[in-house]
Image (cartoon, rainbow, N blue to C red):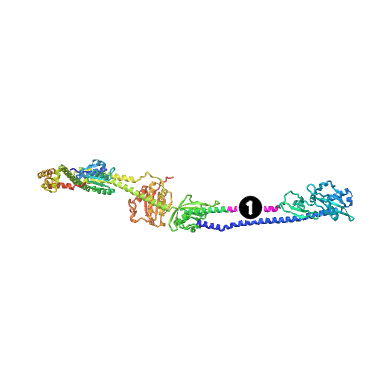
Amino acid sequence: MGSTTTAVSGERINRWHWLWILPRLAFILFVGGVALLLWMSDRADKEEQRATLISDILWLEQNLRFHLARNEELLGRIDVAHTSDAKAFESFARTMFGFESGLRQLIWLDSDGAVKLAHPAITNSGLAGETGEAIPSQQSYRLAHSLGKPVYSKPYPYFMNDWQFEVHVPVSREGRIAGVAVGVYRIRDLLGDSVPWWLAERYRISIIEDSGKVLVSRSKVESTVTEEGYQVGFDPPGSGLSLHAVPYHAPRPLASLLLSGSLVILAMIVLWSLWILRRHVLRRQAVEEQLRQEHAFRKAMEDSLDTGMRARNLEGEIIYVNPAFCRMVGWSATELIGRRPPMPYWADDILDETRALSDSVLAGEGPEVGFELKLKHRNGNAIDVLIHEAPLIDARGQHFGWMGSLVDITERKQADERARQQQDRLQSTARLVAMGEMASSIAHELNQPLAAISSYCTGAANLLRNQTPANEVLPALDKAVEQARRAGQVIRRIYSLARHGEDRFELLRLEERIDDALALMEADLRQNGIRVTVDLQAKVLIEGDPVLLEQALFNLFRNAVESMRDTGPDQRQIGITLACADRYALLTIADRGCGIAADVADKLFDPLFTTKVEGMGMGLAICRSVVENHRGRLSFEANPGGGTVFHILLPLVPVAPQ
Amino acid sequence: MSTTTHIVDDDPAVRDALQWLLRSRGVQSQTWASATDFLAFANHDLCGCLLLDVRMPGMSGIELFDRLRDLHCRLPVIFLTGHGDVPMAVQALKDGAFDFIEKPYDDNALVDKVLAAIDQDTRRAVRENSILCLEQKLTTLTQREQEVMQRILAGKLNKVIADELGIAMRTVEVHRSRIFEKMKVRSAVELSQVLGILGDKPKD
């Protein structure tokens, strides 16, 4: 049974095993989704960033262009007053410089292209001449002069890796070109002035020649640029310059970082908890398997036991029985479990005693050691069991019932009974043999003088018949008399041997002698199913020989038991009454046996008279002899309800007057 | 030949009473207090009867009976038994005891049994005695005389005997007369009668 259970549960486990794939699948989907989400948000971020970049750089270009255009316009407004002397020009230049215009030098060229005024003054043309061209650029001047429009020169390197370019703005007065105002821009400064800080923080802004050479770049943060930037033409003012912006690898927003980080952590937690769960479940399965095996082992052990096990709850309801118990009583487990007292296996004749015993066990007042009890098999056979009861304690330490172990001792008891009967028979045989031996010895003792007497007398008679003189015959007769006396002595000795005499008398309680005699009979009483009722109406103190009295009582009880052989089982009972009347104790022993036939009654107390097959006819003779020896009287009468009543009258110990 | 009845009983009164009883019928008796006492005295020549109590302290009557047989003492034994000893006595009877008598007994019947036993034993003694004498006489015969005697008993005539033995007829006659003289008989018929007893002799 146990093995099939295991197989079924194993199959069930296998069938539901695919359930284990679900959490894994869900986990993979979850991680994939999260990764996709992150990637998408990242891409959106990037696109947004690029759009910002483009708009920012367009704005910057616009701003620069506006800047330059304003400067053009301001330069174009230079008038005579400003160009009249150096001082005025200086103040004009300072004004111009003050607008964060990016201008670093202002030069006034006359209509011939000669430098009239410059602020700051041109100190070292050599330094600026790295381009190999004159400063300011003659070419641009000429172009501006001829076109009458502002012209921008090509950038040229300047000191300290800086680059400069110029703007030539022709100034017309009264319809003719009065001169050209040249503004020198230093590209680094231009960027510095026009690019706001917040832009510089986000992008690396550079100005690139058309050859791709970076002229100047501005950035606030020293950091490697990894991503591709955006380039926008910066054409009209600058010849071949373009503006390039590269966003810094800006730190991701904390929220997104936190989000993705927490997602990763969550995923890991989920993974970890899944793993833990799996490990837990595996361990649980292992434990379950172990438990199953343990259970199967225990069950096999219980099933193989010869000892019956029966558990009851506190109400006495059967909650468990093992197969051995079922075999013992012949009822199946399903029939027994749930039963309440009285149980079907209780013996009918001791139902009340069994119930009392069961109640005392349930109340926790049962015998501490094992006790013997008679039960009934379903087929009606009586079974003797030895029961041990132990409290059942559950996992929380709560007492919830009683577990009883029952050992079948029927055969042992029967064997004991047989051994006892055998013993009894042996003892009785031994008694018979001993008695026979004694009788034979007595007979021999008596035979000798009798034989001698007989021989003397016969001899004397023979002689007298032959007319022998009397004096010759006399000695024989004298000897015969002597032998007759000897025979009398033998008889007297035997008599004194049989009589105990009164020197062993002691004060004793008659009820104790009754108890002791009953204890000797106990096995016989139980075996024959005889009930004994003892009615002690008084405590009786008498003087007597305890051993002899016990023997007499034992004989009377045994006669009572044996007389009830053919009495119905429910009728078998012995009633013992002890009462005091006057100066006598009256003990009555009433049985429900076969009674005493009238022709037997006269000889009842005669020695060697018996109605039993194996009897010696000594029992009642001894009883009467013992009772009379105690100055008492033994009598009997028919029991009105059938059977015999024996009366023993014994004198009480005279109570000393108070 | 004198015969004596031996009484073996541990009880002096019983011994004395039995002796008295036997004497009242003229039977001589001798008493023994125990089996061992009698055994010390016993020999195979005894003639008469033995009254033996079965139950005695020390050696029992049955045991004494066995020991006497070992001694070839053929005294007839009458067992005196108590009530419980009958089977034992019956066994003893089978083993060759003369009789047993159960206590309490009829005294004169006991004496009768004793007399019968004495009579039987006397006859036995007489027969045994004559056989003994005969055997003694036979031993006095010479080799030749025995040869001649066998032929005489076979009923052969002197002449035939002389022929068979290769001796003179006269010599045979001398042998014959000497045989008769030694065997104390007067004729061949008497010789054959005397030797007939020998043939009846029990094998033991």
Image: A41 above or below B126: below
Chain letter for mark 1, please. A
The crowd level at tag 1 (other Cα within 10 Å; few <14, some 14-19, many 20+) is few
- Residue drawn at point x = 43 percent, y = 50 percent: A538
Q: Name the amino acid type tagged 1.
A: Ile
Quarter of the picture holding the C terminus of chain A: top left
Q: Name the spot of residue A33 as percent of width and height, x first.
A: 65, 57
User: Relative to residue A435, is residue A2 drawn left or right?
Assistant: right
Quadrant of the rendered image containing residue B34: top left
User: Of residues A426 and A115, which is closer to you in this image?
Assistant: A115
To which residue does mark 1 refer?
A269
* A125 in the magenta segment: no
Work out whether residue B54 can be spotted: yes
Helix, strand or loop for disc 1: helix
Q: Nearer the viewer, residue A494 or A570?
A: A570
Q: Quadrant of residue B66?
A: top left
Residue A456 versus residue A281: which sits nearer the camera?
Answer: A281
Q: Magenta region, mostly helix, strand or loop? A: helix
Q: Is residue A597 left or right of residue A69?
A: left
Q: Residue A497: x percent and y percent?
A: 33, 45
> What residue range appears in magenta?
A254-280
Please state if B37 lies on the left or on the right of A291 as rendered.
left
Decide whether residue A273 is among the magenta residues: yes
Residue A26 in percent (x, y) is at 62, 57
Horizontal side, residue A405 vs residue A440: left or right: right
Q: Position of residue A622 (x, y in %)?
A: 35, 49
